[in-house]
Image: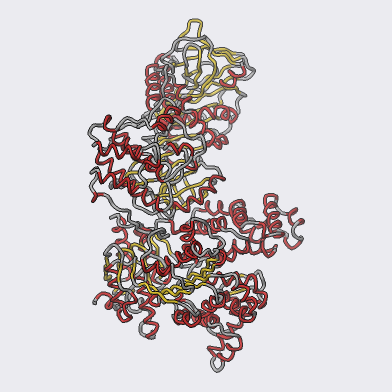
Amino acid sequence: MISTRIGKYSILRWLGGGAFGDVYLAEDSILGEKFALKVSRLSPKEVQVLKDEARVLARLYHPCIVRFYNADFIDGRLVMVMEYVEGGSLRHLMDKDPPGVEKAVEIACRVLEGLEYAHKQGVVHRDIKPENILLGPQGEVKLTDFGLARFLKKGTISASMAGTPVYLPPEGWTGKFTERSDIYSLGVVLYEMLTGVQPFTGDSLEEVRKAIFQGRAAPVTVINSSVPPSLAQVVGKAMHVNPQERFASAEEFRDALVDVGAISAHRVRKAVLVETSVKEEGLQLTEGQRRVVECEHRRILLKGCAGSGKTTCLVHRICYLVEKKELEPSSMLVATFTRKAAADVKERVEKILRREVHEMLIDTVHGIGLRILRKYGWLVGIPEDFEVTPLDDEYLKKLDIKQKGKRLKRLVREAEKLKTRLMRADEVNRWSLGSDYRMNVARIFHMMNRLATEGLLTYEDLLYFPCRIMHRHPEVAEELRANFKAVFVDEIQDFTCSQYELIKLLTAEDACLFITGDPYQHIYSWRGASTQFMDRVVEDFPGVVEFSLQTSFRLPAKVLQVAQNLMSRHEQAGLVATAAKNEGEVELFRASSDTEEAEFVARRIHELVRSGDVSYSGVCVLFRSHFYSRNFEEAFSRSGVPYTLVGMTAFYEREEVTRVVGILRALVSGNVEEYLKGLAWLTGSRRVIQGLSEFEFPDDMKQNAPPRYRRFIEYGAEIMRSPHQFAPGDVLQVLLEDTGCLKKLKRRGSAQAAGQVENLEELLRAGREFKGTIQEFIDHIGLMEDLELARWNTNAVRLMTVHSSKGLEFPVVFITGLAEGIFPLESSSISQRDMEEERRLLFVALTRALQRVILSFPSRRGYQVLRPSRFLFDMVLK
Amino acid sequence: MRLRDICSQPEVNEPLLWRNLTVFPLQAEERKVLPFIVLDEGLVAGRVQVEELDRASVESVVVRNSADDFLFILEGEEIYGALQNRVFNTSVILDPMGEAVVPVSCVEQGRWSGRGTFSGSTGCSHPSLRAILCSSVTRNLRTRRSFHSDQGRVWSTVSSTLTTLRVRSNTVSLSDAFYELRAELDQFVSEGSELKNYSGFLVATGSRVIGMDIFFDRSLYKKEFEKLLKSYALEGLLYMSTQRGTVAHRKATRFISDVFEGETEKFPSVAKGEEFRVLGRSFVSKLTVLDGKPVHLSAFRTAH
């Protein structure tokens, strides 16, 4: 039995059940949205297997497939969160009011659309039956429970309660499922819809099995004479005992239904991908892309406009070198701009190669730098157990700098920029002469270096020190370079000097090199990035061949036009044409105030979702800066639009995550006091650390600890003895679940506690999925970007800055705050160069859209009157 | 006299869900009376015999308790064998070494043949049937001082139960439903094992309370627990396609309040003890009392 509340979900009612588990309608208490929760009866071992499957299922996004959002282990049970489809199953319809021939064929065609899409993703359903075909109130047809049949225990095939397994193809009885098995099962469903009876019956399971294997079903036309013979033949072919005699694909089956006139062609939709987090692989490359991928030159610089397939080419080039040139994945280095991009590239490569590529180094340049420092940091005095942390105010206070608040932050940023420029200490000293401002920057710079030797590194140090090491110790550089026969770099237009230098140092003379970039999407000059490095590639890597892709496959025509208008001073930003299939739409809304603007956006989102054009997760609301999000958060909360903020607070900076990571750090470094303090926080009991100073760890401590906490102290001692032997997931399980920490937080019931639970569960999930030591996991979390979190699987609007949206795409994009002073920022004092970067930023925002862009601007913000952004005139008035 | 004057209301705990059933664990004040054995326990040990009368009658059977402890028979409990399967019309407490003629109802319309001894207990009838037993017996007690039930309604309830559950039964026997659906009923029991830690439970299906059973002796409750849980599970299966919502805590507490505020009618039990019955507008309840101490309370919704 389960509670009426599972995690953050309140159970509203039971929807149905089967061998796998029960399905409940539940409401997410945070989002206010309704979901279908499937609560399984699987054993923990089976759950582990399902988690891999869940990752695949979460990628299926199609109007004819019930969306699978998430799988989690809550209160000891596996709970799967799925889209809730109002209405009932096909079984209910067939029992109540059997569909006629036309309706039956239409339902089958919708299912085939979903199957076609799923099969292309490499997913076989395995359990198609009327109970798994849901019919929505607007006539939608959705297939549910993909791939779950494999988790039924052996022996659950029986003739009890749910009826006989008539939908199981002959090969399915021995566990061999292919796409053609799904074709068979749907054929049986169609048979039943057309005739009102199941094709195979018997008094016992054995009789039914025999009938299936012999293919002994009465002809459809005998039972229902209104069914055209040609249609009956199609059904018969789908249900052939021999899989090779059936339709080879869902598409072929569907085309056959059209060919026999069972359904008119215009009512059959080709599967349209509304949004994908992983692009479809296996699709044909264009001629231009193929030339790039299969180029015989070892060194390639690929410049391409937004949506032209640069990353696709990079992915295919990796696979090409592995498969055709027999390069080992372990000899490849792939540097991406974000960790999410790294994960996406890895996933796409694995899909094409049909194998895992854990041995390939795919990471951001910062991640690569961190790995180098772990091994070689000692050469510049950095301890092995260093941590990556922003510069704490506590240290800045010691410098006794007069500037405070924002001004002090600006000084810190300037010091970081010196690091990105790879300036040495003596160079910084010379640079700082004659200016108090620069002197303060230099002092912060030197403090950062001192802290590094004490094991506290900033983000920029992850690039600065590896470069310093490789410059000072050429033998180390040589050793590292020898590991990589091929180096790939994505989005070089936003590289800083330190990033570029590190890649240059890691690329051997004879290594293959593949670099992508788009100078018109350069938006990080404020961080020290520059497009000059894209130009320097040709000089620094002899033999580089340049390619250019100027057709966008993403941008619809109308959005392309607007983007071209915006960038018309810049040779139309490299955009020549679009190959996107739809025209797209561009809307413009003028609001009387910023509040009205937010309300309009909320209202418009509801309209779009209700019309079925898009789901919440297909909508992105972009703004120039974080501060502009507040109105939207309020408007969305009031009007019930589910949303999630992306990139607002770094994951590792969230308090509860920092605490738990601190405990892990204590375990790895053997810091007993910190571990026990952490344990006190987890258990909520200060008695854990009572009398701390009186005893030596661990034996005396164990004896005097409260009995129920002794095991955690023993566990901690064990880890401290040999941390490498413990998997982060196992340790986090003990720390977060066994101590009762998560349970206590859940019982509080407040929204804040629910948020903390979510973050800790995210941490636990990350730990379980992570393959490496505890120290490596700590590094991983330290670099974790908000973009990586599994919340991509929730059906919620994404709110983010334009910078955060880089590399992403959405069917519908709102670009808000298009007023002077907001977007572009600070127009009165901004330089020409910075203004052009603002323009490029808007260009990046526009080019995130797959279908529709909605621009909005407020005439007023508070008491301040605003003028429309100059960019609006450029975009709209041409 | 109201029920609340005889025993205090139980504490209602947070509900649990199983498919379309919402189950509220109940915690009542422990009032240990005497050690009891229960029917199936006694039959298996050979200390209890249930037989047809010398002149067999559908409406009555003889129960002999040769154990050293009191025998408790739950109302609605089914016995199988003899000439036809029966259920007990009311709860019975029998002395050690005691014997009584006990009123029963037939739940196997299609048989009247076999040996004179009942082989065992199959379990307990589901709440729909228990509600009919309880309400018809209460009416008969008022008018004729008789514990007989409305046999016709019992038969039609058994028949409709078998039809709804699509259970084939050659003799229209209720026990066939328990047998055919044993896998699911066993699952309910295994998943509901934590309910054993309480004194009883209230069950709702969809948005309606079905009924509740409370024992004031925990050890007696533990003995009757499994058969009771299965009986409620069967009820849940009956309403699977029509009743699927969850019931709020306040609805459960309101039902219990109504039961405890009900004006009772006192009757002597079949054997030992007394019964306090309430026939409300939408519910029926019965409290079995021995030597002034409550033993078992059941209550069922009657307006289905």
Residue depicted at 57% across the width and 55% down the height: A768
Residue A89: name its quadrant: top left
Count of numbered circles on the image: 0
Compared with A406, B224 (above or below) is above
Quadrant of the rendered image containing residue A182: top left
> Which residue is found at the position 53% from the left and 48% from the top?
A49
Q: Is residue A472 left or right of residue B300?
A: right
User: Does residue A314 sit above or below A230 in this rendering?
Assistant: below
Q: Give coordinates of residue A841: x percent, y percent.
A: 38, 75
On the question of residue A404 being in view, the answer is no
Along the viewing direction, whichever of B71 and A325 lies nearer the viewer: A325
Give whichever of A603, A564 is nearer the camera: A564
Left or right of A382 on screen, residue A222: left
Q: Quadrant of residue A242?
A: top left
Vertical order, A357 against A517 (above or below)? above
Residue A370 percent across, percent down from the top left: 59, 71
Which residue ends up furthest to the bottom in the rendered image? A434
Is residue A793 among what the camera can see? yes
